[in-house]
Image: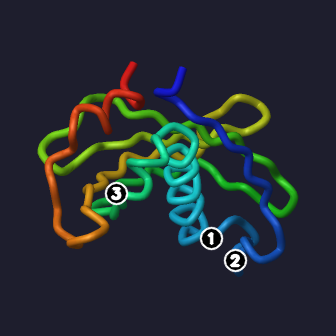
Amino acid sequence: MSNSHTLTFTAGPEHIDELGHVNNAVWVNWIQDIATSHWSAVASEENQRAYVWVVTRHEIDYRGNVTLGDTVEAVTFIPEGPTGARFDRRVDFTTAAGKVIVSARTTWALLDRASGRLLRVPKEVAAPFLS
């Protein structure tokens, strides 16, 4: 189903902060990485050329830590259709034990690449991401 998309991330030395776990800024990068990977995997080439997404909001709940060498599975999905130019996205990071340790709801806005202006999400852009 194209509504969800999965990637695996492994904590390397560059991801670890002074507290010995993955830094919060890294989680934000991983959220962006899976969102853009989902777009690249599902959106038509025509839409990828015509549009670009920008983040307008991140809401992240941290329920655990990941340390050096740990792997998490990230799953992203679109919980509901767009509102105007905006589309909410959910990302959950799960440990090998099956525990969700980081959960995010992010809001993305669609821009026309040529003009740089916000635009209402066209139905044909949204459709492949909805179940």
Pick out the residue farthest to the bottom. 18
Q: Is disc 1 placed on a helix, strand or loop? A: loop
Q: Residues within 10 Å of mark 2 (few under 14, many from 20)?
A: some
The label on residue 17 is 2
- Horizontal and vertical percent position of residue 49: 42, 58
Check disc 1 and report the residue beneath it. Answer: 23
Look at label 3 and name its amino acid.
Ala
Q: Do the residues labelled 1 and 2 touch (CB within 8 Å)?
A: yes
Q: 67 left or right of 33?
A: right
What is the quadrant of residue 19 in the picture?
bottom right
For the point 69% across and 77% down, which residue is it?
A: 17
Check disc 3 and report the residue beneath it. Answer: 50
Q: Is disc 3 placed on a helix, strand or loop? A: helix
Disc on the earlier residue, 1 or 2: 2
Q: Give the spatial CA distance, label 1 vs label 3.
A: 34 Å
Look at label 1 and name its amino acid.
Asn
Disc on the earlier residue, 1 or 3: 1
Q: Which of 94 and 5 is in front in this view?
A: 5
- Horizontal and vertical percent position of residue 84: 12, 45
Q: Do the residues labelled 1 and 3 touch (CB within 8 Å)?
A: no
Q: Which corner quadrant holds the C terminus?
A: top left
Q: Which corner quadrant holds the N terminus?
A: top right
Look at label 2 and name its amino acid.
Asp
Q: 106 left or right of 119?
A: right
Pick out the residue farthest to the right. 69
Q: Give the spatial CA distance, label 2 vs label 3.
A: 38 Å
Query: Disc 1 or disc 3, which is closer to the eye?
Result: 3
Q: 70 left or right of 91?
A: right
